[in-house]
Image: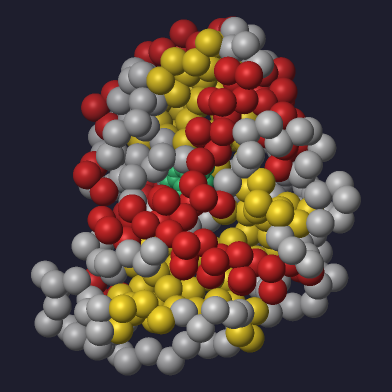
Amino acid sequence: MSEKQDPFSAPFGTLFGDKMAVATYVDGEYDYPGAAVPLENFSLHPGTHVLHYASECFEGLKAHRQADGSVAIFRLDDSVHRMINSIAKLRMVPPSFEMLRQLIVDATTANASFTPDPPGSLYIRPTFIGTAANIGAAATPSSEAMLYCINSPVGDYFAGGIRPLTLFIETTMPRTTPQFGSVKSGANYVMALGPTLDAKRDHVADQVLFASGDDITETGAANFFLCDSERLITRNLDDSFLHGITRKSIIQIAKDMGLTVEERSIPVAELKAFAEHGELFLSGTAAVIAPVGNVITHGEHIQIGDGQPGPTTLKLREALTDIQTGKAEDVHGWLTPLESA
Ligand SMILES: Cc1ncc(COP(=O)(O)O)c(C=O)c1O
């Protein structure tokens, strides 16, 4: 693509920077040449492990253009840690923290000229795949792997910009298998796809909020919050859902603003009680902070407040994006500036 193509008029994730960074894992060692290369197709053997046994995980983070024109990555180290954890959960050998971090910085620096002005950003997608040609290895980790990073200039994740979403609450099944929910693996996303498409078709919902056994966790690609002018509530961490880096940032920002933060289990009934006076929103790197206007539960449509984005939701969103784009001071050291962006 050209640097000038408008990411707001293309679907999220369909435009790409023209460079990538690639490392390989062979004979028990990682080899990273240490520089970005032109983006091009891979050639894989049809028996490649990832194509059969989903030996795959990835990350999603963003670089933002700053007020002075430079480009900075938001919470890079947190994503590196999470990816190392995901690779280990695939029972593969993770790269060193330093190597993975450098690979991400190299790809993103090489593609930095593709970074749109805010509210657009440059999405960063480090990816790990098991590459051994071995269709007999269903119960064995891939002996070889590839680790690479690509970039995508993006606008809004949810078509239509900041608009209140409608959530269907799914109480009969989890998003994925509970012990693997905190791993950012492609397999988890395909498991959530069917219920999400069904809810879109049957209930005209935007997303499914997974709450199996009445225990609210997250949607297919974002964490979930309740708030009002005094409190912020979200599910306490365990292995059943993804430990969002935006989630963690919002909790810190809310504390900085003087809100009381509660991390605990949230029964579905609490949403109904909250609908009268409170606010609901989703959070994620792609979703940023997305307000929820309606929920559908057990055949009942419940409007949240007046159905419009609430004041605390909008205040948190602005505080977050101001830090990401350098409009507010980076008091927690969340930005990694890129050289010669
Ligand atoms: C399933 C799921 N939950 C939550 C999130 C939010 O995580 P983060 O804030 O780190 O992007 C994501 C990713 O965007 C996700 O895919």
The C terminus sits in image quarter: bottom right
Q: Relative to residue 158, is residue 322 drawn left or right?
A: right
Q: Relative to residue 276, is residue 267 drawn left or right?
A: left
Residue toward you, 316 or 207: 316
The N terminus sits in image quarter: bottom right
> Colour scheme in the image?
secondary structure
Q: Measuring from the top left, give residue 278's x and y in whole percent.
A: 58, 12
How many numbered marks appear? Answer: 0
In the rendered image, the vertical position of residue 256 relative to residue 260, given as above or below: below
Q: Relative to residue 198, is residue 335 drawn left or right?
A: right
Question: Which quadrant of the figure has residue 330?
Answer: top right
Q: Relative to residue 49, is residue 254 drawn left or right?
A: right
Q: Residue at x 30, y 25 (%)?
A: 215
Q: Residue at x 37, y 89 (%)?
A: 44
Q: Residue at x 41, y 13 (%)?
A: 270
- Is residue 148 visible in the rendered image? The answer is yes
Q: Measuring from the top left, give residue 181's x and y in whole percent.
A: 31, 45
Q: Residue at x 56, y 52 (%)?
A: 76
In the rendered image, the vertical position of residue 122 relative to residue 262, given as above or below: below
- Is residue 208 visible in the rendered image? The answer is no
Q: Measuring from the top left, give residue 284's x and y in whole percent.
A: 55, 42
In the rendered image, the vertical position of residue 209 relative to residue 227, given as above or below: below
Q: Residue furthest right?
A: 68
Question: Which quadrant of the figure has residue 114?
Answer: bottom right
Residue toward you, 107 or 250: 107
Q: Measuring from the top left, give residue 16's x and y in whole percent.
A: 66, 72
In the rendered image, the vertical position of residue 321 relative to residue 88, given as above or below: above
Residue toward you, 19 or 240: 19
